[in-house]
Amino acid sequence: MFDHAEPAELIDAMGSAARAESAAIAQRLEAVAVLFGCRERHYTDAGFHHTDVHEAVAAEVSAAQNISRSRSRNQVDLAVSLYTRLPKVAEAFARGDVDFRMVQMVLTRTQNVEDDVIGALDEAVAPKLSRWMRLSKKKLRDRVDLYVADFDPAAVRVPPVAKDNRYFDVTPDVPGMAFAGGLLNARDAAALDQRLEAIAATVCSNDPRSHNNLRADAAGALGRGESTLSCECGAEDCAAEVLRESAAQVVIHILAEQATVDGAGDKAGYLSGFGVLPAEEVRAAAKTAKLKPVRLPAAEPETGYRPSAGLKDFLQWRDLTCRFPGCDAPVERCDVDHTTRWPFGVTHASGLKHYCRTHHVVKTFLTGVYGWRDEQRRDGTIVLTAPTGHVYVTEPLGGLLYPTLATPTAALPDVDVPAEAPDKAAMMPRRTRTREQDRQARIVRERRQRIEINAERERQHQAWLAATYEPPPF
């Protein structure tokens, strides 16, 4: 595209592309905000519902953009806040004057500003943003905070208490590996550190692994409830191996072809919740694992509402994740859903699949004119029709990885399903407080903290003035 372009043309192209990118994101967020306004009129009494307007719109956004539930929810919150509270900033964004980074920062730092003040702050800040584009994240944050302090001193964001930010994540990384880490209480971290050191020290001095490798492997032993590592020195009479403890009853699930387990093939396996597992890792796990074949379900439907253990096992491996478009929630955290509602729909692989709890509620209760409907094919494919009439097709991940799991199961008879009650949404699980009440409670709490901080700073300043004051000589 730019093979023969001059440097000046390349610079112009960069600038134009950056502005177009910002304008495109602004257009997308405006569409989300307007959709939210439309749905808000339809779901006027849904504030206390488990799936409120935010969740309902997030489901549509998730399906339309093929993104996860958490990303779609964040996008809805951001879009609604931008176009209801900061319309002037939104205009600058739509013109391409500022980028998404700027918009996120302004939205984050002005969350606590009172509604009767935010309009004036929006008018004051919006013209300045294009000149602030060059600022670093910290300088940009400080600049916005200065304006917030001028218009509403109690609205300046309060840094979170460190202990409230503690977390520990275990997430997939490259195939066969995962990242584990987080922010812990110092005493807990010290105990964990010592425990890893103690386990890492249980191998003999001839073990070829580095100290870091041993600590990493010690984390796995800790997860299995073991207090020793298997030594890899290779000596049959290794004293460390003699003292080795057996594994505790910790269960992980790996899906793989029999040929991979036997060594006749090298197709990767799948570690539930973590993704692809290289063939050599599958074979290493198989040496000490309990092997259980995944069997195709029977042709006849089961009689009960809940699937049998064998049918549930097949469904989990066929689906692997929530079947809603864009959702990647692991199947272990999902519900089994009858595509045709029970008792009209039967308990059979051709009419069952997994939805996470939120999308299960969306499918079950948000029906009718502004609701969702789905159908299921015999190979597990789900065809979902959105409230707008848009159609989304999702295939089972297990079936995509291992085609045998997508083998079409028995056909189900056609049944007449009575129309659902028009007020079915009223039976949806309810929450104790609305999302808006939660937001207001957080704002009140932060504003109170900021007022206390400002008062303490003023007290210290007055004390310093009093201590350093020298009366003039007479």
Image (cartoon, helix red, strand yellow):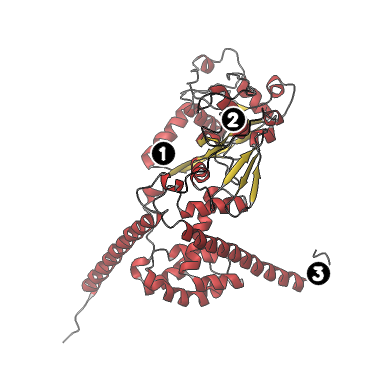
Q: Which residue is mark 3?
A: 5
Query: In the rendered structure, which disc, 2 or 3, sits on the residue that comes first in sequence?
Result: 3
For residue 149, say whether it is visible: no
Residue at point 19%, 80% (across, down) = 471
On the image, the x and y values in percent for residue 463 come to 23, 69
| Residue at 55%, 63% in the rendered image | 101
The span from disc 1 to disc 2 (Cα, nearest Å) is: 39 Å
Task: Give the x, y percent position of residue 96.
Answer: 61, 71
- Report the front residue among 311 and 304: 304
Q: Amino acid at mark 2?
A: Leu
Residue nearer the viewer, 247 or 42: 42
- Residue 386 visible in this rendered orientation of the protein: yes
Residue 230 in the image: above or below residue 24: above
- Which of the two discs, 1 and 2, labels the residue nearer the N terminus? 1
Q: What kind of element bears circle 3?
A: loop
Which image quadrant: the N terminus? bottom right
Q: Dot 2 surroundings within 10 Å: few (below 14), some, or many (20 or more)? A: many
Three-letter amino acid code at the position of disc 1: Ala
Q: Residue furthest bottom?
A: 474
Query: Residue 189's mark?
Result: 1
- Residue 62 position, x and y percent, is 57, 51
Amino acid at pointer 3: Ala
Helix, strand or loop at label 2? It is helix
Neighbours of disc 1 within 10 Å: few (<14), some (14-19), many (20+): few
Tag 1's secondary structure?
A: helix
